[in-house]
Image: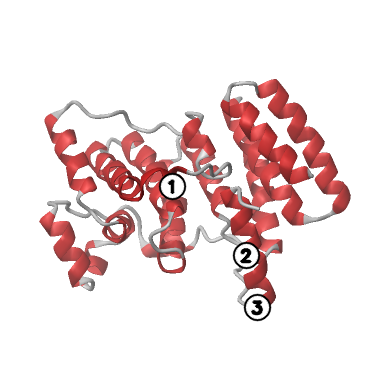
Amino acid sequence: MARHLGLLAATAAEVGDLQRARTLLDEGNALGRSTNDPLSLVTTSAQLGWLAVAEDRLGDAESHFRTLVDLGARLGNGHYSPAVLGLGLVSLRRGDTQHAREMYCKLLSDHRESSPDSAMLGDTLVYLASVEAADGLRERAQRLLGANEAWHAARGPASRRWFPNLRDPLRRGLVPVPSVPVDRRLIQAREEGRAMSLDAAVAYAVDSVEELARQPAIAAELEATRAVAIVPRSTEAAAQTSEGVVMDSAPAMRRRSALQREADGGG
């Protein structure tokens, strides 16, 4: 029941009724806490965080997303993607682009093998593009957006299913996504991104030049699209953004599966 209230709140927030969203989330959060079931609190905690971002209450937003980190850890996923995306957006709103970039790159690195060719990877590129644009790396941002567009275009309407804990912030305009370019260089960068596979785009986003050299197929693809990688952060710094420990037991795998369905808005 708490989860369904969270979904109703997300729907209300998308149409701009933040007061109703807040009422539903408060009710759902209270109900979820009364059951002491972490899974029932995932959607309400995520949506409370996005609501706080919408109202520019960044301290409250950070608190809700850290609660979401804890819930994910209890369910066997110490790097629950909506929590990481939320904390990264809080950092971006505070002007700490380095921390936001490290969190998003770490999320991409963690999931590039466990969730390849997924909507989560594709949409995280959009979050990262907002950081690159904030730092003035406009061509880089447009390449990431182009790669996201190409991934969704290749999969048609099915790729646009409702992901309330992941895509909702994008649909509500909470993430400062760069606009469609009119400058020739930026238009070219967007086209270069559209020519990338998702795997190449993630490598472009997170890997250093030295790491790319050890992946000749990816390096050749990036060279073909004229996308030149830069080093957005050190591997060591990215590793320090890890929060929680991922559990690898069979029960933990089942809990992770349930948690992913919760993130996706599935049953």
3D distance between C-alphas at marks 3 and 2: 10 Å
Provide the residue designation for mark 1: 158
Q: Is residue 178 or residue 238 the one in the foreground?
A: 178
Mark 1 secondary-structure assignment = helix
Q: What's the residue type where badge 3 is placed? A: Ala
Q: Which residue is mark 2?
A: 256
Closest to the observer: 12 or 68?
Answer: 12
Q: Which residue is mark 3?
A: 250
Q: CA distance from mark 3 to mark 1?
A: 30 Å
Q: Earlier in the sequence, mark 2 or mark 1?
A: 1
Element assignment for label 3: helix
Q: Quadrant of the N terminus?
A: top right
Q: Residue at x 61, y 51 (%)?
A: 266
Residue 180 drawn at (x, y percent): 27, 29
Left of 136 or right of it: where is 32?
Answer: right
CA gap between label 2 and label 1 equals 23 Å
Label whose residue precedes the other's in the sequence (3 or 2): 3
Of the numbered discs 3 and 1, the one sitting upstream in the chain is 1
Residue 203 sits in quarter: bottom left
Q: Along the line of sight, which residue is nearer the eye, 118 or 137?
A: 118
- Tell me where residue 244 appears, x and y as whole percent: 62, 63
Place residue 90 in its image quadrant: top right
Going by the numbered disc 2, the residue's amino acid type is: Arg
